[in-house]
Image (spheres, rainbow, N blue to C red):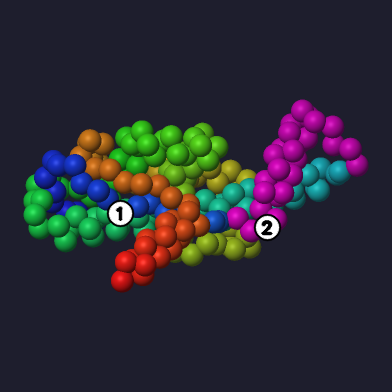
Amino acid sequence: MESVLVEQTTQTLPPLILHPFADAAGPGKLVESSRASLMLQGLLPTGELTPEQLEQRLMDGRYCEIRMLFYVGRDLTRWIHQCIDSLERDHEHPGRTYTFQSFVSYLIRHTPAPVQAKLRKWGVADYKSIFSRALALNTLFDEVPSARSLSPDFIRSYYKYTDAIFKVMMLGDPAEVDEREFEFSLYASGEYSRILEREWGDELAAE
């Protein structure tokens, strides 16, 4: 397991950049899946849809969720490794030992207030479940799995499996990261690209 020594000082970590992860049909599939779930539970009228059609809509939506979460987890995993690498190269701040799990706990259990505020601004309320399930899927798969490679039971109840896997991921006693020790910024990829473009433009204008 990767680890790095750091001392207790406030340091700026690499930015966490989340890339778009939904295709054009994704939002529609998620809405249809939610409605299908309510119909199967008898909470909405089914109209002319058969139980088989409702089940297929539910499964399509659940698989869409798996894909979306996998790509979120890829961004989170990349960021955690960047944090460890950044601190590993910072020889001016030797000190405590932090592992991959330390930064997972920091991100999910001790999320800095500015990051929480930005997630709420984006409309992401239950980010802890989203992040933990996304990281669990990246523990299971190196690449996004095809629907055919997954059992129907896994697709239907993937969240139960990923919640259990996340608990296993966090077994042990990793050094806890004090949220006062570090700070980082959260960006959508398009937002971060615009920031870089402005910075490059300023540098060219100064030359």
Left/right of residue 145 with respect to residue 105 in the rendered view? right
Answer above or below: position of 48 versus 149.
above
The residue located at (44%, 44%) in the rendering is 131
Quadrant location of the C terminus? bottom left
Residue 135 visible in the displayed image: no
60 to 164, vertically: above or below: below
Quarter location, residue 180: top left
Q: Quadrant of the N terminus?
A: bottom left
- The correct choice, above or below, for 142 with respect to 162 in the image is below
Q: Earlier in the sequence, mark 2 or mark 1?
A: 1
Q: Position of residue 64 (x, y in %)?
A: 62, 53
Q: Position of residue 198 (x, y in %)?
A: 42, 60
- Inspect this view and state whether residue 118 appears: yes
Q: Nearer the viewer, mark 2 or mark 1?
A: 1
Which residue is situated farthest in the front direction here? Answer: 206
Residue at mark 2:
24
Residue span colored magenta: 22-48
Q: Amino acid at mark 1?
A: Pro
Please give the label number shown on residue 14.
1
- Closer to the camera, 54 or 2? 2
